Structure formats: structure tokens, C-alpha cells
Image (cartoon, grey):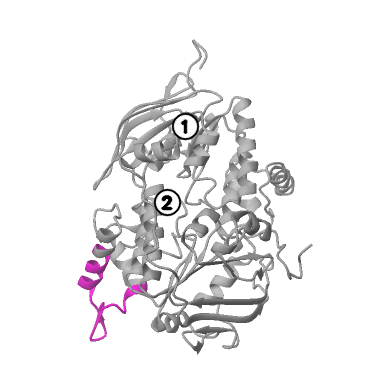
Amino acid sequence: MPPGQPARLSLRGIGKVYPAVVANQDIDLEVAPGEIHAVLGENGAGKSTLMKIAYGVTQPSAGEIVWEGQPVVLRDPAHARSLGIGMVFQHFSLFESLTVVENAALALPGKPDLADLARRIEAVSTRYGLPVDPHRLVHALSVGERQRVEIIRCLLQNPKLLIMDEPTSVLTPQAVRSLFGMLRKLAAEGCSILYISHKLDEIRELCHTATVLRAGRVTGRCVPAEETPASMARMMIGDELPVPRHARAAEGGDTRLHVAGLSRASADPFGVDLADIELEVRAGEIVGIAGVSGNGQQELLRAISGEAPLDTPAPIRLFGYEAGAMPVARRRELGLGFVPEERLGRGAVPQMSLAQNALLTAHRKGMRRAGLVDFGAARRFAADCIARFGVKAPGPQAVAGSLSGGNLQKFIVAREVLQQPKLLVVSQPTWGVDVGAAAFLRQQLIDLRDAGAAVLVVSEELEELFEICDRIAVIAGGRLSPLRLVAETSVEEIGQWMGGKWPGCADAR
């Protein structure tokens, strides 16, 4: 920062205390004009709370905020935006019943013309490689598409300080490259960027400086380019990063899921039609499905989970039963576990306690007695999830919406894994989860597979799929590629297939 020029934002002695936890304690952080500053830490380290304070969502219990050399009290996000502060949230703040352009209009002052705003959205989305249709309803968008909407909505405000909380967690590698190019351009023009990510390679590539938090306190500062991912991980977790390990080779036992010739038109006019899907997942193996968000993952998972049952039972078989038309409850009774990509809303009800959320899918595990709910058993099960998966929560009565994204993800995965399903279907298992927790969750999936379960993982993280899977396929344009043994393919080949260019594909060019 040039001598005499004030920092764009200074946080001095910031503290935030909630009834059950100290989220931030005596935190100092400074970001200069044109600086890309990373904030690192484990899930629950206090990163998101600190960013919400900087955006006016949350008021600090102690400390001072200085904006361009002047002390300020950020009354609310509208006040922050008026100063030039924008934020892209990890948990989306979109109205699902509104269109993309209507959501964007709500974040802008006055009453913008929707037709003109739609053209601006199309221009921004094209310029930065974040394609999205401004007229689509948000509830019909995939997680990756919703992330794009959040980013575009923020860019429309021309911010002086851009706060990004896990912005690339569900973006494709190509979109990440475009985003980084855009962020570097913004920084070169003087925009300051506060960047939260658990992807340490991204931090090293993009960020100029970094502040490390642990348990709500600053534990270190560094220049990411001068560090390695391992050294930054040690700063974050205070230990060496665990590496997931397979105890044995895949068994390839009985078929737990068999999809044969599944074709289905999407109920959403903007959705993706499934075309002749063939898929088999056997006991004792992990099968991965890679692909760019919005290529039919959502439609396929809803068909397998039973959230959108088929008209006929034949195309899907679970544990030998024709299950295409089965309701969700019956599929779970047979031994299906499911972790959806949306943590809040589908994976957990944010206003309910962890014990109540455990009851939603695990009530068959001794939580019913003589037709009544055994709430004591639900609390014990939730406490077991918390203890065994290292969830940072004050207890089973903690409200799900009060947990950090990574800790809520650990709880949801724990809830499904501890039911010992015969088949576990997981979408984006480590989205927004820190490096230590991500390694832990991947190991839990491997351990479940080693215990004889079948596991189907849908993820946009190619490195994750290659780390844990035995076989892998790609979904593109509603079509599924042939399954390949991970040992017989490569990230480069699967990356090419993500464009729909695999041998024998009708869409291959």
C-alpha cells in the first residue's frame, strides 16, 4: 500500500460473541486498494462471521470498522452496498420463486428496468464466462448456476470491495479460470477483494496476502505464493493434512443400483432431459459421476432418490427391486441413503435443531416407540453424529442454520453414514468444506465402501473423484458416458468427456 494512502477496509479488535460460542476474538485485518486478501481457516474458525460483520449483516460485539480511513458503523447490507461493499455468500441469499433478473433487481438501488437489467446480466455473464439465463426461476437452477447468479448480481454493483465466500466451490475449472481473470482485472482497477476458500491451490495462485484464523483468533499471516498447500494447511489445522486411504481393492459385489435406459423429459422448461442413462453401482465400490453443473445431475439424482419418481418402475432397480415409481420412504426402507447438494432446505431444515433434523431421515434407527417419537433417542443419535464426525456445535439442540457450512455438511453426511445404508448417494460431498474436514469426509465414504456398501458420488471436483472412486463416468447434456476404471483413465480424458466428447456418444463431435 502506497505511503499515506489509507487501507480500503480495516477491522480492528473485532469480536463477536453468541450465547453459546465466541465466533471472533480480537481480530485485526486490513485490505488495501487493489489487494486480493485471503481469509483461511477450518470450518467454524470464524471466517464467515467476520465477513458478515464487514458486510453489515452482523454487528460486532467489540472492535472498530474503518472504511477508507474513516470509522463507520455498518447498519445493514444496504448501507455497506452504498459505500461500495459487495458480498457473494456461500449460502445463497436468493428468492427461489423469483427469476434471476428479479433477484438482481432487489440488490440494486431504485427500480431498475428489468429488460435493460436482463441485457446487462447477459453481458456480464458472457464477459466473465458465467452463463445464466436471466429469465429462469431460481428454484429451477442447480447449485452451480445459483452460484453464478450470486456472483453476477454482485458484479452489477461495481463494488470497491468485493467479499467472496467460497465462490468457486461449485464452478467448473473453466469458469474458475474466467473468474480469476475477472478478479485480477478488478484488482488492477483498484477494487479490493476479500477471498474465502478452502482450495489452497487457488489461494496460492490468486491471492496476494492471507490471514489465518483458528477458533476465532488470528493465528498467522502469510504470502500464499511463498507457501505450499501443506504449509498453509498446517497453519489452518495445526497438524499435517490427512490423506484418505483405501483399505483394500474394490470387491464388485452384488448390484445395489441398476439404471437401464432411463430417458425422461425435465419437468422444468429450462432443465435437462435425461437420455438413455445406463448406470450400475455394486456393493464394495465407489462410483463417481463428473460433469459441469446443470447437465442433468439434478434430474438424475431426483429420479434415483425418489424425490421425482418415474411413471413406470422398470428403468431403476434398487437392491433387485424395480424402484422407478417407489416413493422416497420405501427406497430408504430398502437401504438407500441420500445427501443432496443443497445443505439448507433439502439436506437440513435451518430452523430446526440437529436432533430434529436427525429424526427426518434416521427415525427408523430406534427413534420410534409404540407409534410415538423417542426424542431422547433422536438427541443421542445427533450427539453421536456430532462426536464421531467432529461437528463443531454446542449440542443436539443447536439450530441447523447456526452451524457453519462445513460443519452442517459433516452433520448431514454423518446422519446418513451412521444409518449404515446399503447404498449411499452423495452429491457434492465436500462443497465448502475445509481441507482437513474434506479429507475426513472422503475417508468416511471410503470406509463405508470398505464395509461393503455401494456409494455413488456426484461431484464437480475431479481430484476428489480420482482420489476416492473405483469407477467414474461423466454426465453431459443429459447423457451418461460409459463407466471407466479410475486406474485406466485420467483427469485430462475425463475433462474432455465433460464436453460430451466420449467415444460412441451421439453428441460427440
Q: Which quadrant of the view contains residue 453? A: bottom left
Q: What x and y, as percent, mark residue 181?
A: 64, 36
Q: Residue 370 in magenta? A: yes
Q: Which residues are magenta?
A: 361-383
Can residue 397 be seen at all in this image of the molecule? Answer: no
For the residues labelled 1 and 2, say whether their Cβ atoms are less than 8 Å apart. Answer: no
Which three-letter amino acid code belongs to the residue tagged 1? Pro
Task: Specify the quadrant that holds the C terminus.
Answer: bottom right
- Left/right of residue 73 with respect to residue 127 in the rendered view: left
Which three-letter amino acid code belongs to the residue tagged 2? Val
Of the image marks 1 and 2, the number of the one nearer the N terminus: 1
Measure the C-alpha gap from mark 1 to mark 2.
19 Å
Within 10 Å of the Cα at label 1, are there few (<14), some (14-19), or many (20+) other Cα atoms? many
Q: Secondary structure at mark 2?
A: loop
- Left/right of residue 238 with respect to residue 226 in the rendered view: left
Q: What residue would you read off at disc 1?
A: 224
Q: Residue 234 in magenta? A: no
Within 10 Å of the Cα at label 2, are there few (<14), some (14-19), or many (20+) other Cα atoms? many
